[in-house]
Image (cartoon, coloured by chain):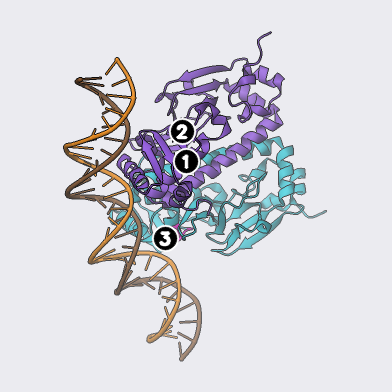
Chain colours: A purple, B cyan, C brown, D orange
Amino acid sequence: MSRRSPCLDCAVRNSALCHTLSPQRLVELNRGASRRRFPPGQMIAGRDPAEDRFAIVVSGVIKLIKSLPDGRHQIVALLFPSDLLGRPFKSDGRYMAETATAVELCCFGRPAFERLMREEEDLRQLFLERTLDDVDAGRDWMLLLGRKSAQERVAALLLLLLRRLSAPECAMCAQQPSHQITLPLSRSEMADYLGLRIETVSRQLQRLRAAGVIETRGRTITVRNVAALERAAESDRG
Amino acid sequence: MSRRSPCLDCAVRNSALCHTLSPQRLVELNRGASRRRFPPGQMIAGRDPAEDRFAIVVSGVIKLIKSLPDGRHQIVALLFPSDLLGRPFKSDGRYMAETATAVELCCFGRPAFERLMREEEDLRQLFLERTLDDVDAGRDWMLLLGRKSAQERVAALLLLLLRRLSAPECAMCAQQPSHQITLPLSRSEMADYLGLRIETVSRQLQRLRAAGVIETRGRTITVRNVAALERAAESDRG
DNA sequence: CGCGTATTTGAGCATCATCAAGCGCCGTGG
DNA sequence: CCACGGCGCTTGATGATGCTCAAATACGCG
């Protein structure tokens, strides 16, 4: 009983869903919750119903992947620290979830979380609003996939990563100068998110580098000219 | 007071969100609700905050469109009878909503609906689950836009329309034999939904016709071979 | 240092976009 | 009833973007 709640110094305590909960509720949620770590490239949720996880991302980046039988893949979402993995009220066998980087999760039992969702007004409301934001994010990406050129797609992805990785909940990612990021994705993963092939991604990065917009060194990218990058990504909020 | 609730013979009373409400709540909601009709091709919601509608689709089909400044468009969702138009808890200036066919809406005031959402457990839950379904639908479409060929896209769209237009809530659409549909979309709209050009859509339809999979007569399409159409669309639930 | 993997680079190609007619459907008006 | 015109759709020819296949290079890691 003298053990303090592990939530108090959680890296995402101010941004994850659970930030709306009272200390008492947190203690309750923590019974049966567990921190788990995964290495990069590991499948952590998918078709196996026994593996029907339900967790908050504490650090690292997770890919949600849809695949076709012939081996084509599309990453349909990236989960960053403070995002929720898992779908309440329905088992979620529609995507594969795989770590892109090393990941730390805070895992709960489904029943405990669903009960909290029912009982806690604020939690429910926050979850709903985040889900509505997910709808919007998906639709933004539909515009990108349906209508944008390879150049625009790559630029848009770099801006997305720049924004999300420098957000406060990613403090742990220890980002260098704010215009420099370490990509959490391989070229192949970038391609799967952008609906392109790996060679095309590589060439578009090359083009941006040649134009002096970015500098690349492996997975480290420095944005030299944010405005130019935004121009390359085209106005997104049309 | 002797006027019976207009909801009793509403075409979507069994499938729209409001089906969870008690008769008393329905009466309440109906104060300030109004039926409105719109011709095809009319913008009914978009950037204008005063036009921030909030409505159930009673009949017809609505397109949600995202656009880029240079005139590229992407339809990011279709709304069919019983679907909800509008985003609660946040004004929704992110898409343009335009009628694809003649449309009948049941419009509410935002405050009334948001209050019901707060007070009615069942309504809230249903709305949440539908929103989660919207997320999934968007992600399915991302796979289509990012990874599927023109042929697969067109076939997938035909199957989608076949399924949705023969659902019970579309009874009003008076679909003919169940393998025949009247497309609610022009070729141009199909292209904007599929991330293709109008000529490509036309050619793919032509290919399906040549293969004996469908018959086309203007906007009337008869599916001769559903299995072949499904094969052309490739397994979707990968 | 050397291997395996990721990434880059190159050459040729396929799919889909673009540009440009042509056709058919329909409503209008003669 | 038929000529006319407009619009949406189809069809054809050409071209560009991004894909495929292949090889070279860079990089991480033992």
Residue B157's disc number = none
Q: Nearer the viewer, residue A125 or A93?
A: A125
Residue A94's disc number = 2
**Alpha-carbon span between mark 3 and mark 1:** 23 Å
The image quadrant of residue A23 is: top right
Q: Badge 1 sits on which subunit?
A: B
Q: Nearer the viewer, residue A167 or A221?
A: A221
The residue positioned 71% from the left and 46% from the top of the image is: B113
Instruction: Please state which of the two labelled residues, at mark 3 or mark 1, is closer to the viewer.
Output: 1
Tell me, yes or no, whether the two marked residues, 2 and 1, touch with CB atoms within 8 Å.
yes
Instruction: Please state which of the two labelled residues, at mark 2 or mark 1, is closer to the viewer.
Output: 1
Q: Judge whether residue B172 can be spotted in this image.
A: yes
State the extent of the magenta-drawn residues as a range: B184-190
Q: Badge 3 sits on which subunit?
A: B
Q: Is residue B188 magenta?
A: yes
Label 2 CA crowd tier, 10 Å (few <14, some 14–19, many 20+): some
The image quadrant of residue A130 is: top right
Task: Indicate the position of residue B202 as horizontal and vertical percent values.
Answer: 35, 60
Q: Three-letter amino acid code at disc 2?
A: Arg
Q: Three-letter amino acid code at disc 3?
A: Arg
Q: Is residue A219 magenta?
A: no
The residue positioned 55% from the left and 47% from the top of the image is: B168
The residue positioned 67% from the left and 17% from the top of the image is: A27
Residue B139's disc number = 1
Instruction: Read off the residue under disc 3.
Output: B187
